[in-house]
Image (tube, helix red, strand yellow):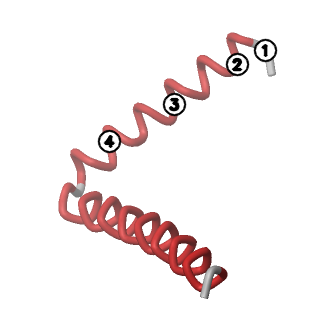
Amino acid sequence: MPAKAKTLLIWIVVIFLIYAIVSSPDRAANIVTAIWDFITNAFSSFGQFFANLTD
C-alpha cells in the first residue's frame, strides 16, 4: 500500500473514531469495555489451557 494511501486511511479511521466518541460516548465506552472483556477472557482461556496441559 502506498505511503500516502496508508496515511489517508489512518486519518480517516482516527476522524471516524473521534466522531463516534463525541456523538455517543456511552456507546463508545460500552464497545471499549466489551473489547477489553473479550481480550482478557481470551488470555485467561489461553492460561487455563496451558495450565490444564500440565495436569
Name the secondary structure under disc 4.
Answer: helix
Name the secondary structure under disc 3.
Answer: helix
Q: In the rendered image, which residue does mark 2 sit on? A: 5
Quadrant into which the N terminus falls: top right
Residues at marks 2 and 1 touching, judged by CB atoms closer than 8 Å: yes
User: How dense is the environment of label 1, judged by Cα within 10 Å: few (below 14), some, or many (20 and up)?
Assistant: few
Q: Earlier in the sequence, mark 4 or mark 3?
A: 3
Disc number for residue 2: 1
Disc number for residue 19: 4
Q: Position of residue 38 (x, y in %)?
A: 45, 70
Amino acid type, residue under disc 2 in the picture: Ala
Q: Earlier in the sequence, mark 1 or mark 3?
A: 1
Q: Position of residue 44 (x, y in %)?
A: 46, 73
Q: In the rendered image, which residue does mark 3 sit on? A: 12
Q: Earlier in the sequence, mark 4 or mark 1?
A: 1
> Separation of disc 2 and disc 3 at Cα?
10 Å
The residue shown at (62%, 80%) is 54
User: How dense is the environment of label 3, judged by Cα within 10 Å: few (below 14), some, or many (20 and up)?
Assistant: few
Name the secondary structure under disc 2.
Answer: helix
For residue 6, what is the image quadrant? top right
- Toward the right, the furthest residue is 1
Amino acid type, residue under disc 1 in the picture: Pro
Q: Position of residue 8 (x, y in %)?
A: 59, 20
